[in-house]
Image (spheres, grey):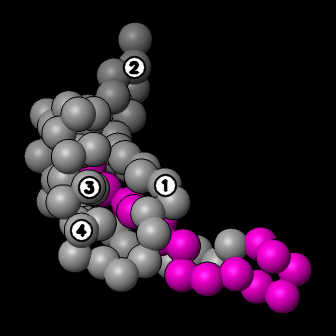
Amino acid sequence: MAEALLEGTKLRLLFEIGMDEDGAPILRAKTFSNVNKDATVDQLSQAAQAITVLSKDTLNKVERNDSSEIIA
């Protein structure tokens, strides 16, 4: 049976920096590496909110990106 070993976690924040000519939001991403692999959803949300306070742009989306190695 194959196994997945979690190698790393990244936190990606998408900020809305404006609108294009069609009225669709223009987004800018900021990615934070070396996030604790054991971080909970609540902890990541709190971190995202703390970072957002330092930004002039509006937070649009928060993503957790996990990277795993598949061992067969």
Q: Which picture quadrant has residue 2?
A: top left
Name the amino acid type tagged 4.
Answer: Val
Residues at marks 4 and 3 touching, judged by CB atoms closer than 8 Å: yes
Residue shown at the point (36%, 81%) measured from the top left? 56
Q: Which residue is mark 2?
A: 2
Residue shown at the point (37%, 73%) measured from the top left? 30
Q: Is residue 72 above or below residue 19?
A: above
| Front: mark 2 or 4 | 4
Q: Give the image location of residue 34, x and y in percent.
A: 15, 59
Q: Which residue is mark 3?
A: 49
Q: Give the image location of residue 69, x and y in percent.
A: 33, 40
Instruction: Give how far apart the Cα atoms at labels 3 and 2 are.
Output: 37 Å
Residue shown at the point (54%, 81%) measured from the top left? 17
Q: Which corner quadrant holds the N terminus?
A: top left
Q: Which residue is mark 4?
A: 53
Instruction: Give how far apart the Cα atoms at labels 1 and 3 are.
Output: 11 Å
Residues at marks 2 and 4 touching, judged by CB atoms closer than 8 Å: no
Badge 1 crowding class, 10 Å Cα cut-off, few under 14, some 14 to 19, many 20 or more, is: few
Badge 2 crowding class, 10 Å Cα cut-off, few under 14, some 14 to 19, many 20 or more, is: few
Instruction: Give how far apart the Cα atoms at labels 1 and 2 are.
Output: 32 Å
Q: Is residue 66 above or below residue 26?
A: above
In this rendering, position of residue 68 left or right of residue 26: left
Q: Which residue is mark 1?
A: 61
Q: Give the image location of residue 62, x and y in percent.
A: 42, 52
Q: Secondary structure at mark 1?
A: strand
**Residue 13 circle label:** none
Name the amino acid type tagged 1.
Answer: Lys
Badge 3 crowding class, 10 Å Cα cut-off, few under 14, some 14 to 19, many 20 or more, is: some
Stretch in magenta: 8-24
Considering only order in the chain, which callout, 1 or 4, is on the residue closer to the N terminus?
4
Residue shown at the point (54%, 73%) measured from the top left? 16
